[in-house]
Every structure is written in C-alpha cells, then in structure tokens.
Image (cartoon, grey):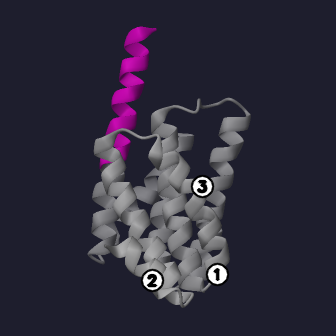
Amino acid sequence: EVAKKELLMDDIVQDEHEFELFAEMIRQDRYGDVLEKIEEIEKEGSNLQKIRSKILGSMIFVRKGMLDDALILVEGALHSLHVLLEEKSVSSSSHVKRLKVDILLEFIEVLWRLGRVGAGLTKIEEVKEIINAMEEGIKSWKETKLLNLTGLIYYVNGQFNEALENWE
C-alpha cells in the first residue's frame, strides 16, 4: 500500500514536470509533440492527466487566437476536477491544489484575452487563496504568473495604478 502511494506520487511529480516542459514548448510555438502527447493522454491517460491535457490544449488555442475554444477546454478542465473532487476520486492534496491553480491561471489568461476582466478578477481572488497556502518553491512561480495576469487585467480595465502595483 505504501509502495503503491509512493509510485503514484512519482507519477504525479513526473506528470507535473512533463506538463511544464510541454507548456514551455507551447510558448515556443512547438505544437507537434504536445498535440501527440494530448492524443496519447486522451486514449490512455488518467483523469488528472486528461485535465492537464485540456490545459495544454487551451494554451495552444490561446496562442492561435482561438479564444472561444480555449475557454471551452479550460472550463471543461475545471469542471472535470470538481467532479473528481465531488466523487472523491481524488483528494484535495497539494498536487490537486497545484493543478487547480494551473487551471485557474489559464482560465484567467483566457478571460483577460476575451476582455472579461470582471470574471478574471473573481478568479484571481480564488487563486490567491490557494497560492497563499502553498510551499514557497512552487508558490513563487505561480504567484509571479498571477501578479502578471492581475496587472494585465487591471491595465485593460483602465486601473493603471493597480496594474503597476502588481507589476512591481
């Protein structure tokens, strides 16, 4: 039982590391390998892997300017996570909280790009609560991304002082 839990944690850490590598590939406009991985996960992946693949798909749609499609995927990822938590298929552990932050950060970016700043600000408050409870190493990167997105939303909303406060 303990060995099985350790193996599961190794898989989760590997999935998170792989997710970050694929996210970086998307930022570099290298979609081919990412799309192959998404297809592979959709066929054989775990529920949590499928949620991560939806985030990756949303990131690709954002890069291609297909914002409505990105919104559908990121909403689907958040819904899938809520269903798993309600069914108690997964526990609200630190890795699930990090996954939720990843989903919400992507959600905020999509909302910002769609000009839905009010909805974006609501999600920002939700992410802040989760991030504040995280470990320092993980917290810093996710907090930086959140501050950047918060600044962008305030900027688009014409709240320039608040934008600058987040970017400092």
Is residue 127 part of the magenta span, yes or no? no
Mark 3 or 1, nearer chain start = 1
**Distance of label 2 from label 1 (alpha carbons):** 20 Å
Q: Amino acid at mark 2?
A: Asn
Circle 2/circle 1 CB separation < 8 Å: no
> The residue tagged with tag 2: helix, strand or loop?
helix
Of the two numbered discs 3 and 1 in the rendering, the one whose residue sits closer to the viewer: 3
Find residue 126 and name its label. 3
Q: Earlier in the sequence, mark 3 or mark 2?
A: 3
| Residue under numbered circle 1 | 116
The reply to whether residue 72 is visible in this rendering is: yes
Q: Position of residue 149 (x, y in %)?
A: 45, 72
Amino acid type of the residue tagged 3 in the rendering? Glu
Q: Position of residue 97 (x, y in %)?
A: 51, 42
Is residue 51 left or right of 119 when viewed as pictured?
left
Badge 3 density bin: few <14, some 14–19, many ≥20, Cα 10 Å? few
**Helix, strand or loop at mark 3:** helix
7 magenta-colored = yes
Tell me the amino acid under the disc marked 1.
Answer: Arg
Looking at marks 2 and 1 on the same chain, the residue that comes earlier in the sequence is marked by: 1
Q: Which residue is mark 2?
A: 161
Instruction: Give me the C-alpha separation between circle 3 and circle 1.
Output: 16 Å
Q: Establish if 46 lies above or below 103.
A: above
Circle 1 packing at 10 Å, graded few (<14), some (14-19), many (20+), is some
Residue 13 image point, x, y percent: 34, 37
The magenta segment is 1-17
Q: Residue at x 65, y 63 (%)?
A: 75
